[in-house]
Image (spheres, grey):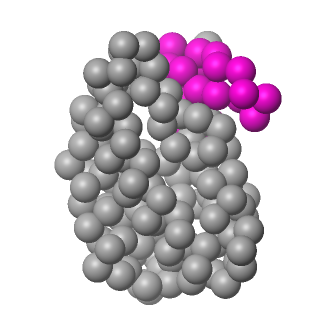
Amino acid sequence: MKTLRFAIIFSTLIGMSFSSALQAGQYDLKEMTPEVTQALKNRQARYGELQDLKTQNSVGENSDGYVTALGDGSASGIAAAENRDREVIYRAIADQNQLGPTGLKVIETVFAEVQREKTRAGESFQLSSGEWTKKS
């Protein structure tokens, strides 16, 4: 029940399909720690601003599951805050699923894929090759 509740909260707060991530890697968050709860709240609070920055191509989804400030760097503070919160969540998933020393990279890769799929037309994202492109 707790996992299902988290899946609904998580997908709502970060604007992606958690079920897609689960299917891609079969990972879940087993415990809502205070750090994860705070990271989710932080992400919810900045969601609209982050989406606006994506629409303006001031930030894009990189190939590591995080966002990158593009252009003049005015969005770098929002990108840094978003990335800190994503890392808290990713680390918790890796730790709680006992994925070992490479677990964080596995989770980052899974979520980068999902974020790339969820990118809207005209928004920037980074291919696994490192090349940046816009979704058509």
Q: Is residue 119 visible?
A: yes
Left or right: 116 in relation to 47: right
Q: Nearer the viewer, residue 32 or 69?
A: 69
Q: Which region is colored magenta?
A: 117-135
- Residue 68 in percent (x, y) is at 48, 32
Residue 34 higher or lower than 52, as above or below: below
As for residue 133 lying within the magenta part, the answer is yes
Instruction: Give left or right: position of 84 versus 104.
Output: left
Indicate whether 121 appears above or below 11: above
Task: Tell me where residue 4 appears, x and y as whole percent.
Answer: 46, 76
What residue is at 39 percent from the left and 54 percent from the top?
Answer: 84
Which quadrant, please, contains the N terminus?
bottom left
Please identify the quadrant where the C terminus is shown: top right
* Quarter-of-image position of residue 42: bottom left
67 w.r.t. 32: above or below: above
* Residue depicted at 36% across the width and 13% down the height: 72
For the view shown, which residue lies furthest in the right direction?
Answer: 129
Q: Quadrant of residue 131?
A: top right
User: In this view, which residue lies farthest toward the left?
Assistant: 45
Work out whether residue 76 or residue 123 is closer to the camera in this orientation and state it. 76
Name the spot of residue 28 as percent of width and height, x first.
57, 74
Asked whether 134 falls inside the magenta stretch, the response is: yes
Q: Is residue 26 visible?
A: no
- Across and down, in percent, residue 108 comes to 62, 54
Number of labels in the image equals 0
Q: Residue at x 53, y 69 (%)?
A: 91
Examine the image and state in which quarter residue 135 appears. top right
